[in-house]
Image (cartoon, grey):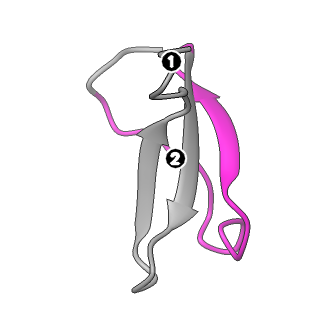
């Protein structure tokens, strides 16, 4: 896969209540809905241990 391109991470129906873990371009990410319902994605790492 190429970086800096758009990829489908999940469908809107998949992103209901619980956050989803995915690996995209060999990067672990977590996908979730914010309080206002908009989707968001972050690297799936521990900020305290940087792991």
Total numbered circles: 2
Residue extending farthest front: 48
Residue drawn at x 43%, y 42% is: 42
Q: Quadrant of residue 38?
A: bottom left
Residue with the mark numbered 2: 8
Q: Is residue 15 left or right of residue 6?
A: right
Count residues near mark 1 (Cα–Cα under 10 Å), then give few for <14, some for 14-19, many for 20+. few
Q: Which residues are magenta?
A: 5-26
Q: Position of residue 4 (x, y in %)?
A: 26, 25
Task: Tell me the quadrant of the picture where the C terminus can be found.
Answer: top right
Q: Nearer the viewer, residue 26 or 6?
A: 26
Q: Of callouts 1 and 2, which one flags the residue occurring earlier in the amino acid sequence? A: 2
Asked which secondary structure carries label 2, the reply is: loop
Q: Main secondary structure of the magenta part?
A: loop
Residue drawn at x 35%, y 39% is: 6
Comparing labels 1 and 2, the label whose residue is closer to the camera: 1
User: Quick check: is 10 in the magenta stretch?
Assistant: yes
Q: Is residue 37 above or below residue 45?
A: below
Q: Is residue 16 left or right of residue 9?
A: right
Residue drawn at x 62%, y 54% is: 10
Give how far apart the Cα atoms at labels 1 and 2 are: 12 Å
Q: Position of residue 39 (x, y in %)?
A: 44, 67
Residue with the mark numbered 1: 25
């Amino acid at each position: 896969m190429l970086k800096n391109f758009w990829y489908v991470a999940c469908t809107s129906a998949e992103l209901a209540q619980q956050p989803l873990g995915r690996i995209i371009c060999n990067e672990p990410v977590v996908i979730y809905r914010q309080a206002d319902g908009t989707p968001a994605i972050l690297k799936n790492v521990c900020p305290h241990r940087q792991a």
